[in-house]
Image: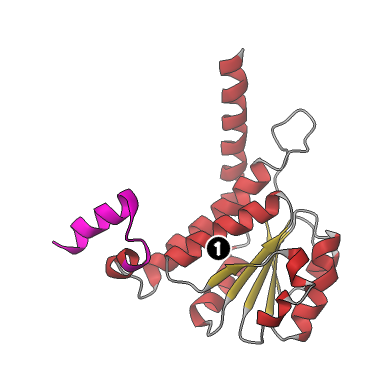
Amino acid sequence: MLEKDIQFVIDAESEELKKLSHYLDYRSVETLIEKIKDNEGNIFVSGCGTSAMAAKKIVHTFQVINQKAFYVNPSDAVHGGLGVVDKNDIFIVISKGGNTNELVSFVGNIKSKGAYLVYVGENESSSICKVADLFLKVKIEKEPDAYNMLATASTLAVISLFDAIAIYLEKNTSFSQEVFLVNHPSGEVGDRLNKNVGK
């Protein structure tokens, strides 16, 4: 029973990721990639709850590939944290439904600062989507838990999309193994990079 339950979840999440690759609006993805490649400012990513965990993972991956990316805590944002944002920045908001109060409360401020606002989620009629400059639709058919509530497959879908974006940027910018080593000198990755760069 345990084995079947575990396999069910892994298989269900895998299927949702496969679906994502087919329905994704690649023109919107390309627009974001070009914005990032031409970006002269910072990339900020924000979200609440499980979306915050996805945002932090995205930020870390972007930092590794030499992008100036930072996580913004929504509660800090509305208490002065928005002071770091300016017109040269890209601000990515992750919200499945697009109406999360903590995020809705400051997206107008992001727009007034002139930053490029990206909404990542499911709901094109949401409050955040209505003011966003770019919408990246990431929508799954069903979470694998019995209540269709745990943000599991949907979170993996968002992370998977940005993993793909990061790897594309890794391949199509001036990023190199030498830069990789400077950014990631420790651990097994650092050891492997040291061997490769030293060849």
Query: Which residue in the structure is indicated by mark 1?
Result: 59
The residue at 31%/69% (across/down) is 176
Q: Residue furthest top?
A: 1
The residue at 57%/30% (across/down) is 11
Residue nearest the viewer, comparing 8 with 78: 78
Q: Amino acid at mark 1?
A: Val
What residue span does the magenta drawing correspond to?
182-199
The residue at 73%/51% (across/down) is 49
Answer with left or right where residue 70 lies relative to residue 174.
right
Quadrant of residue 9 in the image?
Answer: top right
- Main SS category, magenta section: helix
**Label 1 crowding class (10 Å Cα cut-off): few <14, some 14-19, many 20+?**
many
In the depicted structure, whether residue 138 falls above or below residue 18: below
The residue at 55%/63% (across/down) is 59
The location of residue 12, given as percent across then percent down, is 62, 33
The location of residue 34, given as percent across then percent down, is 53, 76
Q: Is residue 193 magenta?
A: yes
Residue nearest the viewer, comparing 143 with 53: 53
Name the quarter where the C terminus is drawn: bottom left
Residue nearest the viewer, comparing 174 with 73: 73
